[in-house]
């Protein structure tokens, strides 16, 4: 099994399939049976299957404002431009009108992303050819500068809901994975730790939502436990939002997920847990358990890649239990599931 940065690439597919539930439906299932040498090759396969499915449904079309000179009136007359044409003895009308078009931002992102993968050397010839076979369906669609995509401005409605997962995949491919050559073309950079960190967090959350419905799993906002707080003081304090909060009965486990190239920090030739991470989960636990009941516990969950040393901690700070665990991503997925299930067993015996 081939891996990337110590993670089995097939496991990245499984993580994506939990983060984006659509990957568990339609024609994506057979991806899990294949081996991929590079992560970009995996993305090329996902995008090929996603676009193929979308083409069967039809490309999304929306009304685009057009301005053109026509022999007959269409839409709204642009009087000033029409007068200029008449002065030049041109017997045409200048019109402004809305036209239902496939040349919109969503399709432009799909075409641009596919085009970049086609030119990427780490994508196999087979998958490049698959993507090339789809390009004739995008003849009427423009490309878009990847660095000028306003991802937070994308809007989804009933007619384009099937694009939501595809846009998330395109975001993972484009954002943080591109660099510009001197010639102005684009090539793939390394899949960033920041993106893996967000994917890892989303994967763990969705895993518990899917497989442990006896738990309530959600990100949670925690209020600062301040006696007689003044509004001005609260405004200056940072917000506290957990990655994952597991809740069952009167027990709560706060999980803070972390993905780093290196899990441990080194100080004076000594390997230690990142102090900021430990302080963070400790602060979450103590502020949520304001009555000091000991029913709130915390866990730092690191994604283990290739490091030989893995952090491990299980200690009580007052009545509250704080743990540090690692989830080995360089194993068959059944092992990952087993490790995540063990965390639930630990939580229920806290």
Image: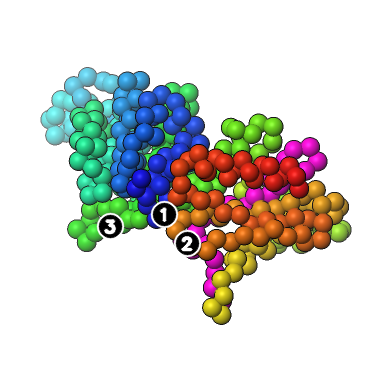
Question: Magenta span covers which residues?
Answer: 245-267
Q: Which residue is mark 2?
A: 307
- The reply to whether dot 1 and dot 2 touch (C-beta < 8 Å) is yes
Of 198 and 183, the residue lying toward us:
198
Where residue 132 sits: x, y (%)? 20, 35
- The residue positioned 39% from the left and 34% from the top of the image is 32
Where residue 195 sits: x, y (%)? 45, 51
- Does residue 24 sit above or below 12 in this rendering? above
Is residue 263 one of those drawn in magenta? yes
Q: Which residue is mark 1?
A: 6
Real-space Cα distance between discs 1 and 2? 9 Å
Earlier in the chain: of badge 1 and badge 2, it is 1
- The residue positioned 32% from the left and 20% from the top of the image is 56
Where residue 70 sits: x, y (%)? 20, 24
Residue 180: image tag: 3
Q: What is the secondary structure assignment of the residue under circle 2?
A: loop
Q: Is 216 on the left-hand or right-hand side of 210?
A: right
Q: Where is residue 59, by image quadrant? A: top left
Real-space Cα distance between discs 3 and 1? 27 Å
Q: Is 217 on the left-hand or right-hand side of 25?
A: right
């Amino acid at each position: 099994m081939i891996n990337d940065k110590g993670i089995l690439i097939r496991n990245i597919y499984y993580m994506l399939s939990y983060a984006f539930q659509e990957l568990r439906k339609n024609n994506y299932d057979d991806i899990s049976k294949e081996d991929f040498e590079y992560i970009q090759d995996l993305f090329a396969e996902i995008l090929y299957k996603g676009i193929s499915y979308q083409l069967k449904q039809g490309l999304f079309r929306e009304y685009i404002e057009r301005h053109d000179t026509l022999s007959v009136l269409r839409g709204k007359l642009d009087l000033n431009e029409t007068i200029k044409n008449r002065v030049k003895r041109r017997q045409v009308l200048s019109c402004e009108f809305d036209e239902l078009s496939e040349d919109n931002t969503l399709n432009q992102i799909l075409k641009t992303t596919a085009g970049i993968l086609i030119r990427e050397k780490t994508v196999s010839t087979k998958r490049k050819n698959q993507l090339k076979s789809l390009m004739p369906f995008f003849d009427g669609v423009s490309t878009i500068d990847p660095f000028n995509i306003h991802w937070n401005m994308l809007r989804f409605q009933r007619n384009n809901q099937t694009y939501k997962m595809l846009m998330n995949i395109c975001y993972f491919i484009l954002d943080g994975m591109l660099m510009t050559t001197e010639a102005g073309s684009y090539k793939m950079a390394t899949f960033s730790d920041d993106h893996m960190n967000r994917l890892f967090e989303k994967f763990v959350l969705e895993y518990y939502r899917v497989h442990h419905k006896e738990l309530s799993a959600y990100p949670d906002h925690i209020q600062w436990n301040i006696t007689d707080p003044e509004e001005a003081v609260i405004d200056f304090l940072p917000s506290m939002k957990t990655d994952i909060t597991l809740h069952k009965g009167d027990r709560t486990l706060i999980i803070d997920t972390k993905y780093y190239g290196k899990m441990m920090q080194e100080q004076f030739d000594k390997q230690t847990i990142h102090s900021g991470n430990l302080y963070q989960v400790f602060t979450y636990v103590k502020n949520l358990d304001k009555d000091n009941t000991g029913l709130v516990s915390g866990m730092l969950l690191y994604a283990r890649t290739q490091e030989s040393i893995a952090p491990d901690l299980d200690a009580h700070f007052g009545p509250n239990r704080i743990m540090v665990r690692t989830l080995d991503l360089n194993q068959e997925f059944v092992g990952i599931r087993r490790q995540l299930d063990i965390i639930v067993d630990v939580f229920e015996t806290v």
